[in-house]
Image (spheres, grey):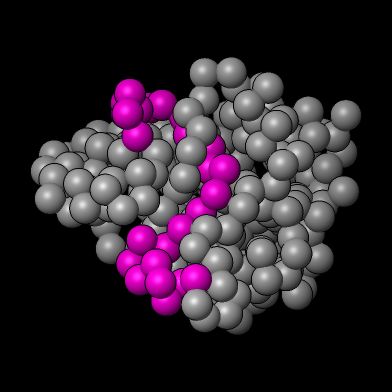
């Protein structure tokens, strides 16, 4: 079994790199893949860079070059769901671009307002982390850090969290028929205090996601 793991930033992958057995790094265009293993599972990690374009490009390269059985996105996110607090874990059951007109998304290829999560991975994560919040995750090319924009996104999509990569990775995996899930930890609440909260919780939230990812991989192998 081979699992591709994608994060946007080095801080979001640091815990994983510290705990897997790294075999080699492969230069891939302007970036690199880190090849390793964990508990008998082959792992391919890529830190794709912030934003949906970077995420989509390196997801496609990962699929074409490494043919993973699953792709898991990890990282931090802004919390929008009711009852979601900083350092809470969230998992997406579907993924949408909140910077794309909904009618456009539904009327143009691939005619999807939202891209689905892997049923297998979603079930496994919910069983392993019973306190996790589940819901729609949305993404755009902008960091959300004001109450007005937050409320607009909530009214249209009612998401559990917001970030800058997940929907693009989900979109790419959907087109390639690769099972996908995103597991994130809340670093801020996408409000007027988001910048300060992000700075305070970036590292601890990233490590928390990495810790739980490894537990999921242990279960996935069984």
Q: Nearer the viewer, residue 69 or 203?
A: 69
Residue 88 part of the magenta-drawn span? yes
Q: Which residues are magenta?
A: 81-106
- Residue 32: tell me if it is visible: no
Name the side, left or right, on which 79 lies relative to 211. Answer: left
Using the rendered view, name the quadrant where residue 222 is placed: top right
Name the side, left or right, on which 20 lies relative to 131. Answer: right
Name the side, left or right, on which 82 lies relative to 178. Answer: left
Q: Residue at x 63, y 26 (%)?
A: 126
Q: Residue at x 17, y 42 (%)?
A: 191
Q: Position of residue 5 (x, y in %)?
A: 64, 52
Q: Is residue 221 above or below residue 145?
A: above
Q: How many numbered marks have been drawn onto this rendered protein structure?
A: 0
Q: Nearer the viewer, residue 54 or 180?
A: 180
Residue 94 part of the magenta-drawn span? yes
Q: Residue at x 24, y 44 (%)?
A: 190
Q: Residue at x 68, y 71 (%)?
A: 175
Q: Position of residue 198 (x, y in %)?
A: 26, 41
Q: Nearer the viewer, residue 15 or 168?
A: 168
Q: Is residue 131 above or below residue 95?
A: above
- Residue 192: tell me if it is visible: yes
Q: Position of residue 144 (x, y in %)?
A: 24, 53
């Amino acid at each position: 079994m081979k699992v591709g793991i994608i994060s946007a930033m080095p801080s979001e992958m640091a815990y994983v790199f510290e705990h897997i057995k790294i075999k080699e790094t492969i230069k891939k265009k302007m970036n690199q893949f880190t090849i390793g293993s964990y508990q008998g599972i082959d792992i391919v990690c890529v830190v794709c860079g912030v934003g949906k374009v970077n995420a989509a490009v390196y997801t496609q390269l990962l699929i074409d070059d490494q043919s993973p059985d699953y792709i898991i996105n990890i990282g931090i996110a802004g919390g929008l769901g009711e009852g979601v607090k900083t350092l809470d874990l969230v998992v997406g059951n579907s993924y949408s671009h909140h910077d794309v007109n909904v009618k456009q998304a539904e009327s143009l290829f691939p005619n999807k307002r939202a891209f689905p999560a892997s049923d297998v991975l979603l079930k496994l994560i919910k069983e392993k982390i019973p306190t996790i919040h589940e819901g729609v995750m949305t993404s755009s090319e902008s960091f959300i850090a004001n109450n007005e924009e937050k409320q607009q996104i909530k009214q249209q999509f009612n998401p559990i969290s917001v970030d800058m990569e997940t929907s693009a990775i989900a979109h790419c995996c959907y087109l390639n028929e690769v099972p996908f899930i995103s597991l994130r930890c809340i670093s801020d609440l996408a409000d007027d205090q988001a910048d300060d909260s992000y700075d305070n919780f970036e590292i601890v939230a990233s490590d928390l996601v990495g810790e739980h990812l490894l537990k999921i991989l242990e279960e996935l192998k069984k």
